[in-house]
Image (spheres, rainbow, N blue to C red):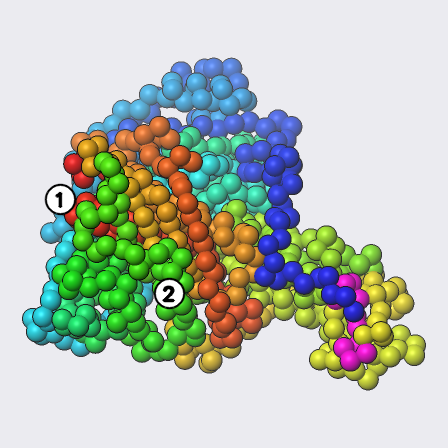
Amino acid sequence: MNNETSYIGQPVNRVDGYAKVTGDAKYAADYNAGGLCYGVVVSAGIARGRIVRIDASAALQLEGVFQVFTHENVSGLAWFNMSYKDMDAPPGKHFRYLQTDMVTYSQQPVALVVAETFELARYAATLVNITYAADAHTTSLTGNLDKARPPKGKKTGFKKPANRGHFEKAFKAAQVTTDVTYYQGAEHHNPMEMHATTVLYYKNGSITVYDKTQGVLNTQSYVKSVFGLSGKKVKVLSPFVGGAFGSALRPQYQLFMAVLAALELKRSVKVMLTRQQMFSFGFRPITQQSLSLGALEDGSLQAISHKAISGTSQFEDYVENIVNWSGMLYHCKNVQQDYKLVSLDTYTPLDMRAPGAVTGVFGLECAMDELAYKLHMDPLELRRINYSVEDGSMKKPYSSKALMDCYEQAAARFGWSKRNPRPGSMKNGHLLTGWGMATGMWDAMTVPARAKATFTADGKLTVGSATADIGTGTYTIMTQIAAETLGLPIDHVTFQLGDASLPFAYLEGGSATAASVGTAVQQACLQIRERLLSLAKDIPDSPFRELSIEQITFADGKMYMSETPANFIHLKDILTLTATDAVNVTSTPLPNIFKQMKYAKNTHSAVFVEVQVDEELGSVKVSRVVSAVAAGRILNPKTARSQIVGGIVWGISGALYEESVMDHQFGRFINHNYAEYHIPVNLDINDIEVIFVEENDDVVNPLGVKGVGEIGQVGVAAAVANAIYHATGKRIRDLPITLDKLL
């Protein structure tokens, strides 16, 4: 037996790569049909108030303009609030588009112009004249801190901060303390592919929806509920997504607009948002957080207080796990945590890559660095001293935790031992060199998922699940899992996703897809193995008749007797000899909940950063990054490395460049384009080294996978900020760290 079908853990090229580089891959706005018309959304020009009058007559007089949809002519939609709830919706009164004259945030969609061409629809939209009665609005978080309140509801996945011990007493008794406040402005997701929906309408009243989404079932459920359609009438497809980062977790308003127009006009409609309109919905929330740390002179933490206040909309309570990491990451008996919201006249914030952790760990890890300097201690040594072997909040040991190995391997590769601890001491001409580090942490989640598998007599396997691939490599790793489990060449396996008719999968997010859908795919292929062995036993004079599945090996497209591999049969021959066209199974893996409940399940990382700061100009260059990641079993080191590198780049972006700037006079994000919303370009990104630390975990899921989508970004901004302090001696606690703040 020569096993050439071992793929898990190998750097397999993306199976969807050819389709993407040749243009064969179609995205939501790429689909066309006969008679397709185009919709352009008109956005509100005020942040709060009401619409007094909409005059669409000039637009409607243009030949080729079919309709201008507004709150004045849209009716018959669902009235119950829960009908507008989606899988990622926070508590509150979910927004209903074009159903009221009230304006509750700037750029709220207030009209949809539909015409036979995109150019005509765009021009006609400029002719829609809207008169507003504006009310006073409030969009400043820091100007409304006195109005902060606890969240009104509980969002799935939100862990209520748990206090323990006696913080005040321990903090007063601490020998060394630090008490600091950090601020982080809003960030918008800004994927390359803007949000778009193409709806194909059929004469029987059914529709096919091509949507940019991280969950086709979420899209389908929303459309069915809002428009009162049966599942048979709504087909949803999203085979390719050009980046999302969380922006497509919730149905965005182009979906509503396209479906509304298609059903009313009884024709196919396409609606795509502009780059400016990409700033009209969810974003990483504006947050102010305060941290107080107390320690003994030997560095052991005695008290931690972490309090955060974030902005949300007037109609929903969006919450994040911002402060919780401080109760988990380090060993400390006295922890105080608090989280509050301020309602602002903006749209509801939205999960953005590593939601909560990017913000909260930034605060914690900068505060730890500040404490280390007060202690005259190496920041890495401070973290080693306070290393936790259990989640202090849940009082549970970790299913696995190789963070100490992350520290050691990353520090060695970076050369941390050569660091001069005195700020400003490492200088090269007019450049100040700084070295900083931080810890990263994220959840290792597994959510419900199913998969179907079909093995046919031509030796080909098709596996499918209604999940998504937003560029993370889902197509590829699922193909690897299926190919290895059934012992097939990888080009004999096809994985299907992005189709609401496929078996259930939850939203693609939270770094849970590889573990969740991967387990379902593995389980489906294991069931195929059982079925094939059962069929092989029915073949006359079968040598497999008395064997159990444990005595069988699947490899190279064959089924072998493990102890005597000279005895084998081609898998496709099993079907031919038993006159079987195909073997079909659908898996519903059930996690070992009782075993998992005993443990805390997380990924960890150690991030080391070098910066070069021009002492005259204040410009910052991140010259080196070394990140060591412990995330269980790595299914594909090539795609996994891409995920970590992408996260690091975004961490640098959040630290130095990225911020959605609010003009409070108008209540609008004003830098809503790629020219003014600053992100790093190739010249800004230099040496990045990723280390995957070996970590075996038989608790999280049968594959031992923890997911890598989020962990790459967590801790990076803190490491950059800490490196800048080491270079300059200046603490900047307000992100992004721009040269004006340094100067």
In whole angstroms, how far apart are the C-alphas of marks 2 and 1? 44 Å
Q: Which mark is in front, 2 or 1?
A: 2
Res 581 visible:
yes
The residue tagged 1 is 143
Image: 718 above or below 101 = below
Closer to the camera in the image, 34 or 378: 378
The crowd level at tag 1 (other Cα within 10 Å; few <14, some 14-19, many 20+) is few
Q: Is residue 219 left or right of residue 459?
A: left
**Outermost right residue:** 540
Q: Amino acid at mark 2?
A: Glu
Q: Which residues are magenta?
A: 555-564
- Quarter where residue 445 is shown: bottom left
The residue located at (8%, 74%) in the rendering is: 173
Q: Is residue 702 magenta?
A: no
**Residue 503 position within the rendered picture, expressed as x and y whole percent measured from the top left:** 60, 59
Q: Quadrant of the N terminus?
A: bottom right
The residue tagged 2 is 408
**Residue 592 position within the rendered picture, expressed as x and y whole percent measured from the top left:** 51, 77
Q: Is residue 644 left or right of residue 168?
A: right
The residue located at (33%, 51%) in the rendering is: 609
Closer to the camera in the image, 432 or 563: 432
- Quarter where residue 588 is shown: bottom right
Q: Is residue 687 left or right of residue 516?
A: left
Q: Amino acid at mark 1?
A: Gly
